[in-house]
Amino acid sequence: MTHPTENAPDPGLQLHFRSCLGAFATGVTIVATRAPEGDAVGLTVNSFNSLSLDPPLVLWSLRRVARNANLFRAAGHFSVSVLAVGQLALARHFAVSAPDRFAGVAHHEGLGGCPLVDAAIAWFECETVSVQELGDHLLFVGRVLRCARVPGLPLVFHQGDFGRTIALDPEA
Ligand SMILES: Cc1cc2nc3c(=O)[nH]c(=O)nc-3n(C[C@H](O)[C@H](O)[C@H](O)COP(=O)(O)O)c2cc1C
């Protein structure tokens, strides 16, 4: 007979796992889409990454219990705005629950009506090609239809804190 707690995740192990993942510094993005009723929806995401150059594919993952999980699943497109170091407030804003996160946030509309955050340093406009349920997340793969970038330094996320890059002396 299986003990009910036998398959429960070990909280100590989860903390350790998260801490180890935190050693991997990432950029910070806002991933967004457009709801059928017309609302712009998005959230702060650091699971964004490159997947393939030919064809151009990117990926990100979304907690299955996220408020807009079904909406992202059903949407044919998503956008990714890579935040600049000066956009820490936006990263925080898009990581807490609010009815309309895009209200008062400067943005413009991209392919599929997906909102692109102004003053970001790069944008990817994607067509969703695959959504997979894996563990407690949904893995989204998008084909990049259009991307752009402007000069600027990225906002960084490392070990649970936001930061900035410091270039190393190439001669050192
Ligand atoms: C730096 C940072 C990165 C995050 N990355 C992700 C991510 O990759 N996937 C995810 O589902 N949530 C991520 N989150 C959490 C979501 O932004 C947060 O839970 C958000 O409120 C979810 O949207 P919802 O409230 O509409 O469900 C991240 C939060 C922060 C601060």
Image: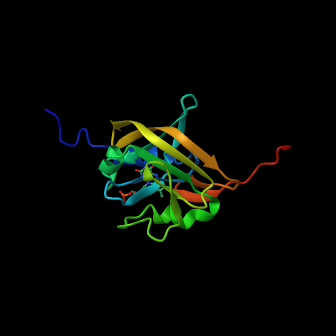
Choose between 144 and 86: the one closer to the eye.
Answer: 144
Query: Residue 49: horizontal and vertical position, in percent?
Result: 53, 41
* Count of numbered tags: 0
Query: Residue 142: horizontal and vertical position, in percent?
Result: 46, 38
Residue farthest along the bottom direction in this orientation: 104
Instruction: Look at 52% across and 62% down and name the residue there.
Output: 107
**Residue 53 seen from this side:** yes
Query: Residue 154: horizontal and vertical position, in percent?
Result: 64, 54
On the rendering, which quadrant does ligand 1 occupy? bottom left
Choose between 92 and 131: the one closer to the eye.
Answer: 131
Quadrant housing the N terminus = top left
Q: Would residue 8 appear left or right of 86 to someone viewing this image?
A: left
Quadrant housing the C terminus = top right
**Residue 10 seen from this side:** no
Choose between 104 and 134: the one closer to the eye.
Answer: 104
User: Height in image: 120 above or below 79?
Assistant: below
Residue farthest along the right direction in this orientation: 171
Q: Quadrant of residue 17?
A: top left
Q: Would residue 172 appear left or right of 108 to someone viewing this image?
A: right
Instruction: Look at 35% across and 59% down and name the residue there.
Output: 38
Residue farthest along the top direction in this orientation: 54
Instruction: Look at 52% across and 40% down and name the residue there.
Output: 145
Its colouring scheme is rainbow
Residue farthest along the left direction in this orientation: 1
Instruction: Look at 61% across and 61% down and name the residue there.
Output: 119
Q: Quadrant of residue 138?
A: top left
Q: Would residue 62 appear left or right of 30 to someone viewing this image?
A: left
Query: Residue 149: horizontal and vertical position, in percent?
Result: 64, 49
Choose between 142 and 92: the one closer to the eye.
Answer: 142
